[in-house]
Image (cartoon, helix red, strand yellow):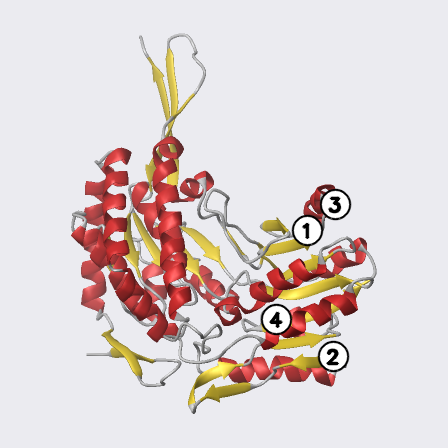
Amino acid sequence: MLTLTIDNPFTLDVACTVPLAEPHEVDRVLDQAREASRALRATTVAERVALCRKALEKMQAAEATIAADVTRMMGKPLRQAKNEVAGMAGRWSHMCDIAEASLADIVLPPKEGMERRIVKEPHGVVLDLPAWNYPLLTAVNAVVPAILAGNAVVLKHSPRSPLCGEHFAKAFAEAGAPAGVLQALHCDHPTSERMVSDARVDHVLFTGSVFGGHRIQGAAAGRFVGVGLELGGNDPAYVAADSDVEKAAESLVDGCCYNAGQSCCAVERIYVHESLYARFVAACEPLVRAYVMGDPLDDKTSLGPIAQPNHPRELAAFVEDATRKGARLVAGGKATAVGGKGRFFEATLVEGVTQGMALFQRESFGPIVAIGKVASDDEAIARMNDSSLGLTAAVYTKDRERAARLAARLEAGTVYMNKCDSLDPALPWVGVKDSGRGVTLSALGFDHLTRPKAIHFKLAL
């Protein structure tokens, strides 16, 4: 039997070992999911909402266990892991709240002798492939709306956070879901790609890297199957000339460093108007230096270890590239350990970053505050849009109209004013360019988990 073993990023001991599915087990899971999808399709939306609410109660009752598992698998400080459980519950509840209205038939205006409706039917079986960095949030975005829409879900979680899939499956089983409605499956990447190409899978949702998105898209190339891709970000922020420097600095440093910067919508590039530049850099420095690395189970720890073993070395290379090309390292910049434990990367502040440096060209995915200077709004827009990625962008200004003008020109799925690195489940989560395609959350999120059927009845011969 093949197994997957991952380490605890702080202790470096074994965090967990799970068995990898054999081919016959994958077949059994997919066959059971098809049967479950037929049973779930026969239920009403109200019944699915009740099921999902019961499953949420089970997840919330297990908050302590789930948060502890997240911490030991990927290093997130326990306090932040508990925040993720709460954030998951908020998204879960919102999708339940809007399900009946969002999934209701669209009834067309009356036409004599005719009945015309658009019915939103489930696809059948949804394969969900969430990411490790927010293992609860990236899963709930797909799992709950998919089930509310009447689909069965096969949940294959990231190999960095496999136990999260089991928590979702257990919650739905304890809530009384029909067998097979939500199944957690552990398998290797080639097996995941084979499932994408399997005719028993009707829709695929993937959250991860651009490279991984290309692999999933390639695996689906031989089929007419829908693929939703939530990929990376190289998210910019602009501090305009009229911004509140101290408040912008506080917001943006947190947006760069929360979850050790391991977020698809973390701020990776900060452009500051030249009139505020020196003040902004000075305001950021003490905030960056205030981060405390340490045991993620300790409440005093605000910066946890880096999840992936190879990543601290990659982050150091980003900083080295910038300083070699003329940027100034103000704070941090090194891979380190704490008390001889863990793989950490210091909270880092680099200023004088220019567009040709790797920090402004590629997703670093670490706790690095990278700052560059611009002379105007127009220059800021040009620099912000100079990326192959387009997940979110942020504008810090006291002028709502200025923010609206800039938002109209920004190539991003979400544009913030005076905030960053956050999500409202009532709004669609979507990327442009290489940040992916498709929509999760909001009422629009159900559209990608259903297919329209036209009801065109002539009521009398």
Q: Position of residue 406 (x, y in %)?
A: 72, 48
Label 1 and label 4: CA atoms lie apart by 28 Å
Q: Position of residue 207 (x, y in %)?
A: 44, 60
Number of other residues with Cα within 10 Å of mark 2, as a class: few under 14, some 14 to 19, many 20 or more: many
Instruction: Residue at 26% x, 61% y: name it.
Output: 167
Instruction: Residue at 44% x, 38% y: name it.
Output: 443
Q: Amino acid at mark 2?
A: Ala
**Is residue 412 depicted above or below 20 in this figure?**
above
Quick one: label 2 or label 4, which is nearer the N terminus? Answer: 4
Q: Position of residue 110 (x, y in %)?
A: 43, 12
Quick one: label 4 or label 3, which is nearer the N terminus? Answer: 4
- Name the residue tied to disc 3: 402
Quick one: label 2 or label 1, which is nearer the N terminus? Answer: 2
- Name the residue tied to disc 2: 327
Q: Please tell me whether mark 2 or mark 4 is closer to you in this view.
A: 4
Q: Amino acid at mark 4?
A: Leu
Number of other residues with Cα within 10 Å of mark 4, as a class: few under 14, some 14 to 19, many 20 or more: some
Question: Are the residues at dot 4 and dot 3 in contact (C-beta closer than 8 Å)?
Answer: no
Label 2 and label 4: CA atoms lie apart by 20 Å
